[in-house]
Amino acid sequence: MNKQEIKAAGLCIWCKQPRGEYGTASHCRPCAKRNNADLLARKKRKLAEGLCSACNKPRGLNGTNTHCPACAEKARNRTNKNADKRLNSRICAECNIPIDSKGTKRLCSKCVPVVNNRLSNKRHEWRAKREANGQCTECGGARDDLRFKLCRNCRTSDYGSPRTEPTGRCRDCGSELKNDSTNRRCPDCITHQLIRNAGLSSNFAPIMIKKLERQNFKCYYTGVRLYAGVNLSIDHIIPKASHNFPGIQCLDNVVWCDVIINKRKSTKTIEEFRHYCKLCGVTLVV
């Protein structure tokens, strides 16, 4: 029997035993583990010798950690092609199932919190590693003062640009600012930035501004006066962590509220938040 006949019969191509429920397409579970271990050892040996893991040629100075320049370019093209294919077909990049209405462009609703937690854990890991090594947790540079986690440049920067005193004009649109303004953006630009940070499309900006006007520039939960650049923020009534989250682009689920109230609400539902405010002695208007 050749390999194709053995695989068609449901047997392992190495030991000729049934592959079973936890086997791969060609091996039973024990043989699959042994095969994976052999492949990993072979790959480590190639990397230690400075060879490409795909074509066994020297990686050279322009190669990556695992591939020579030619194989690295092929791998990038293959990855981009598969990503575009999934994006056009609305297939989740994590679990390869169709993306539902509550998902994002690349992930389904089930994989979004999983990927976010994974990225958050990785971020905490490399920041803790940098802090232990005496490096800036943001850029990895040397810290001038070990009392701070950031270097001087990162402590005095805002979105990658040096922090300077207000020049009297908005840094985004160039419009004049009020004399007593301590912000570097005008209220309109701050509002649009909050809308983008909330994950909403820029096409929804006029609708969100009208919603702020309908709220009379007051917090949706407490009725506190809202000021752009001071306490203005956007909150999801049904939190993203909830199983019945309607999606980021659902405008009926987003409201303007005070930034402190937004932090206190966090991932609570409206019923849980009412109970929390009752215990804290805070009066809600909703």
Image (spheres, rainbow, N blue to C red):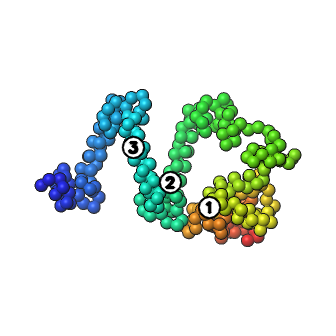
User: Residue 169 appears at what percent x and percent y?
Assistant: 80, 44
Q: Tell me where residue 141 sits by quadrant.
A: top right
Up/down of 79 relative to 212, above or below: above
User: Residue 21 appears at what percent x and percent y?
Assistant: 27, 61
The crowd level at tag 3 (other Cα within 10 Å; few <14, some 14-19, many 20+) is some
Question: Three-letter amino acid code at disc 3?
Answer: Ala
Q: Residue at x 80, y 48 (%)?
A: 175
Taking the image as shown, residue 171 lies to the left or right of residue 97, namely right
Q: Nearer the viewer, mark 1 or mark 2?
A: 2
Q: Which residue is mark 1?
A: 267
Q: Is residue 115 visible?
A: yes
Q: Earlier in the sequence, mark 3 or mark 1?
A: 3
Taking the image as shown, residue 17 lies to the left or right of residue 55, namely left
Q: Which residue is mark 3?
A: 75
Up/down of 51 relative to 200, above or below: above
Q: Which residue is mark 2?
A: 115
125 and 141: which is toward the camera = 141
The crowd level at tag 1 (other Cα within 10 Å; few <14, some 14-19, many 20+) is some
> For the C terminus, which image quadrant?
bottom right
Q: Secondary structure at mark 3?
A: helix
Question: Three-letter amino acid code at disc 2?
Answer: Val
Q: Secondary structure at mark 1?
A: loop
Q: Secondary structure at mark 2?
A: helix
52 and 83: which is toward the camera = 83
Taking the image as shown, residue 131 lies to the left or right of residue 260, namely left
Q: Residue at x 79, y 63 (%)?
A: 217
The crowd level at tag 2 (other Cα within 10 Å; few <14, some 14-19, many 20+) is few
Q: Report, in whole angstroms, how far the alpha carbon at label 1 lies from the one at label 2.
A: 17 Å
Up/down of 48 relative to 176, above or below: above
